[in-house]
Amino acid sequence: MIRNETQQPHRRGKIAIIGNRRKFLLSVGAVAILANTSVWGMGSDVAVQCIYFTPAEAVKLAALADRIIPRDEWPSASEAGVVSYIDFQLASDWGHGQGLFQQGPHLRGTDQQGYQLSHTPRELYRLALGHAALRGFESLTVAEQDRIIGECAANRLSLGDIPGIVFFTALRQNVVEGYFSDPIHGGNLDFSGWRMVGFPGAHAYYLTDVDRFNMSYDRAPSGVASRAGKPAAGPIIMRGQR
Amino acid sequence: MAIRLPRTEVLIVGAGWTGLTAAYELANAGRKCVVLERGGFRHEVPDLQSPEMHDELKYGQRYKLMMDTQRNTLSFRNNTSETALPMRRLGSFLPGEGLGGAGVHWNGQLWRPLPSDLRIRSHYTERYGAASIPPDLTIQDWGVSYDELEPHFDFFEKICGTGGKVGNLRGKKTPGGNPFEGPRSNPYPNPPMKQTLSMKLFEDAARKEGFNPFPMPSANVTQRYVNPYGAVLHPCTYCGYCERFGCGYFAKADPIICVYDWIKDNPNFELRTNATVMRVNKAPDGKSATGVTYVGKDGRSYEQPADMVLLCAYGLWNVHLMLLSQIGEPYNSETGTGTVGRNYAYQTLSSNRVFFNGRHKFNPFMGAGALGTVCDDMNGDNFDHSGLGFVGGGYISVTQTNGRPIENMPIPAKTKTWGAEFKTAARQNYNSTLSVSLHGSSMTTRGNYLDLDPTYTDDLGRPLLRMTFDFPENDKAMSKHCTAQARRIAEAMDGDLVESAERATSHYSVVPYQTTHNTGGAIMGIDPTTSAVNRYCQAWGQHNVFVFGACLFPQNIGYNPTGTVMGLAYWTINAIKNDYLGSPRPLMGGAR
């Protein structure tokens, strides 16, 4: 585990942001997940090396994500690598607007017409995390944090031109993705999300089990690149990463 | 200036189920076929192999097999008083792109329509009187009968190695199958899929409530099987990555392994990928097509002359091309005149979630796209509609298609969708919840239609297709009635909590996924003032243009469309091979 001791983990002690933008530039192409996951749930630190987020943004996002999926006997979102996951996503083609029709005019539509802002996902996060309504979010009490997220979810709060519900929907979706997607994407560390619900992952042969009623299926999950308890050797490099 | 290419006999737009099948049949009949596909080449090996394919984020959430909405989409509004805005991301439906089209990521739920579905207006008028049909509905007969299509349904079921239980064999009812289905000339070529606990609970509850459950007909193959074209299909592994994914096991019938592999080496067949057709070109008198203009992989414009043009793109894009090419008269919703874009319809879905709170282990990740048990008692006119005030219905089912956790994390409606409450509920319900679903029909009205958008364009500068759609009152009433019946079954399953959710209680939205069953817009019929193509799916005004796909449906049935789409495809191909090619002409009078 690599840590930059000059950088203080934020006060809940779950996340340490490593390096800065300059260091990121040197590490493109070998984006490593650097995490001590063997003792999650025990107050462990998760180190995140960000491609896109500034350390301040990453700390704020960790605090937000940990209210979407807080820690209980299973890890919180940030402990499960969700900050790295979202950072990877925003650095990828998707973050730059892949699959998003961006032609204007960008008019205000009905709920039924879906997302109509001009922001790509990476722009959306930068604007939302930098908005005054989230200033100092990571230092608030949990109750205050929940109140702000609840205001967003109820669309009673806007972050500039971003309606609260739009940011909440993106945040919740991306946190859930990071918690439950294949670990090759940077989240779901140690398969914790899959183990929590009992999802075997990329395993795909149930011909002899599918009609066994109420079967306890306890096979350790496997991902595209690795199995639980057998992490992939070396840094995981995202294919097609920008 | 477009580069003019040597003439071909048959030009086919789109390399999905219908386009590749037309190419197979016509190339084997000795005709030179060129297939233009806007997406890229892909194949089971190596592109659809596991474990790489079993990545929910990449394929299930980021839609790597689907159309690229960054380049081309449609605009949407609920009604004409709104301004249509671009559907900026995929959501409600997922058209495909690339070799095999949406046939690569379908589920394999392979249905035929009911005989009465195909003559809906006549049927309701005869049985209940003309007044039984709500006056705002523009529903109409298809112009083709079940008996005419039956051999083609039968053949396509063999192409797919379909598994199921026959319910009506040549007019004789057989136990265990669908007692409401039209007569089949043959049983299914393969046995049904296995039964999960969730399906068994549904079957028992449905019987108890007086319904007639049977296994869902499935193109997820249940044993080694060789189809009529030579494709070898293998038994499904119940991997749980079916819809939204390609099948690397050669177990889900798709157009690549079932058709393409068996025509690709025929010298009469040529596939050009990354070729986007801009328009169908017409002769100076407008009475026939001369070929198409397309933009190729190199970004240059090509003119491809052809004796005939088959529109085999996804239904929505067939309508788009017809509007751009002025094949037929565009529909005008104010006057109700014109036909292209008319009678767009969708599907009316609802669910009844049953929470067992940990008392069962359903293991939802053991699944397959067409793994399910169904009751057809509430579909079509299988029940008495007297005094109900609506037409149509839907099938009720429990399916076990997947347990992919980003998409499927059922929690009770009163539970907060985030925070500790969400997390606890997710754990508690993931493995012990099922859904009794209604897959309902969608009737047509004057105000639901497709045309060209006045503002937004695609990456090639063409106006986007504009969709104007909301759930008609008829379908809201149908949904309410049939969902209540489905709920009876759900409540007989001894769960802790049953929660019903209907799509058609409020406005239609393009955001949440519902189903990729977009129908109409280029509908078939026998009257050129109310249909875009004739009963052979031939354009009324341009006899050498034939149209394929669910855009032909005059309104949508309560079943998944692929079986009907392909029955119609073989019906059209048959008319082309056995009648049209010998004497090219309008196959029905009445051309304008």
Image (spheres, rainbow, N blue to C red):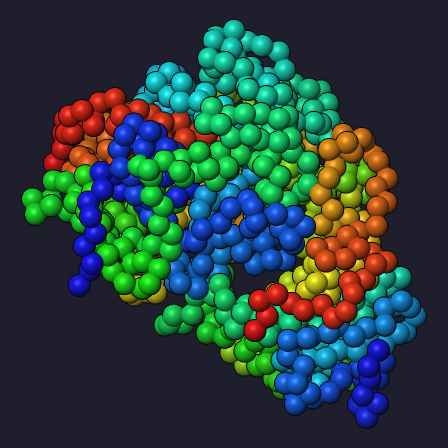
**x, y (%) of residue B481?**
54, 32
The quadrant of the picture occupied by the N terminus of chain A is bottom right
Give the residue displayed 46% in from the left and 37% down from the top: B261
**Observer-nearest of B398 and A89:** A89
Observer able to see residue B400: no
Left or right: residue B449 versus residue B175 is left
Identify the residue at the far bottom of this view.
A6
Residue B185 location, x and y as percent?
A: 46, 12
Residue at 84%, 90% in the rendered image: A5
The quadrant of the rendering that contains the C terminus of chain A is bottom right
Q: Which residue is drawn at the image coordinates 29% and 27% (left, top)? A: B29
The extreme left residue here reads B285
Q: Is B518 drawn above or below residue A193 in the view shown?
A: above
User: Nearest the camera: B298 or A80?
Assistant: B298
Residue A137, quarter of picture:
bottom right
* Image: B71 above or below B363: below
Q: Image point 64% across, 63% down: which residue?
A: A173
Residue B517 visible in the displayed image: yes
Residue B433 x %, y %: 74, 41
Total numbered circles: 0
Relative vertical location of residue B511 with respect to residue A214 in this rendering, above or below: below
Depth order, front residue of B254/B69: B254
Taking depth in this image into account, of A107 and A121 the one nearest to the observer is A121
Percent position (x, y) of residue B1? Answer: 17, 63
Left or right: where A160 falls relative to A201: left
Give the vertical position of B263 relative to A9 (above or below): above
